[in-house]
Amino acid sequence: MQIPSVRDFGSRSDHWSAGTAVCARTVVDSSGEVLGSVVDLLLDLKLGRIGYAVVAIGGFMGIGARLVPVPWNALRPGGEQFVLQGSRKVLDSGPLFADELWDRSPPRDWHESVHAHFRSRPYWEEPKPTRGRKAAQSLPQ
């Protein structure tokens, strides 16, 4: 008996997916042009939401790639890839995800500038999920 991989979970669905299966998915624009690939996700653990996909752009085989935080709500699932609600120009001119941000929470103005750049509603202003617990604001003041 072969045990399926977690990466196979939800591979044929736009509704469910294993978190690990999201990483390495291609990001395209609305015309299907490949823009980059998702390398990680930034989670807001207090709100229980995905805040951003970290998208690698440029480079060759991972060398020299730039990391751009893309608001989760600026991406739409499209089969085995994500469609950016914007153009290559918007992604290429996006704020970079600096190495030091992996170790600490970015300040609120960083979050606001990323959402403003992608013209997306900040995830913390989205309607709260209908779950049994209250989600608290988690952004630094």
Image (cartoon, grey):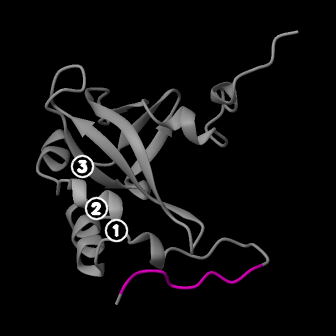
Is 76 positioned to the left or the right of 131 in the image?
A: left
Q: Quarter of the image for the C terminus: give it.
A: bottom left
Question: Which comes sooner in the sequence, label 2 or label 3?
Answer: 3
Q: What residue type is labelled 1?
A: Arg
What range is drawn magenta here? 133-140
Q: How many marks?
A: 3
Is 140 positioned to the left or the right of 116 in the image?
A: right
49 or 14: nearer the viewer:
49
What residue does disc 1 label?
A: 104
Residue 109 in view = yes
Q: Which residue is drawn at 60% across and 67% down?
A: 48
Q: Which residue lies furthest to the bottom in this view?
A: 141
Please tell me whether residue 89 belongs to the stretch shown in magenta.
no
Residue 86 in the image, given as x and y percentages of width and height = 26, 48
Residue 65 in the image, given as x and y percentages of width and height = 18, 34
Mark closer to the observer (1, 3): 1
Tell me the tag on residue 101.
Answer: 2
Displayed quadrant of residue 14? top right
Residue 32 in the image, given as x and y percentages of width and height = 32, 27
What residue does disc 3 label?
A: 68
Q: Residue at x 55, y 64 (%)?
A: 49
Dot 3 surroundings within 10 Å: few (below 14), some, or many (20 or more)? Answer: many
Q: What residue type is labelled 3?
A: Val
Q: What residue type is labelled 2?
A: Leu
Please tell me whether residue 138 belongs to the stretch shown in magenta.
yes
93 up-or-down from 78: above or below: below
Mark closer to the observer (2, 3): 2
Check if mark 1's residue and mark 2's residue have beta carbons within 8 Å: yes
Displayed quadrant of residue 27? top left
Residue 72 in the image, given as x and y percentages of width and height = 43, 55
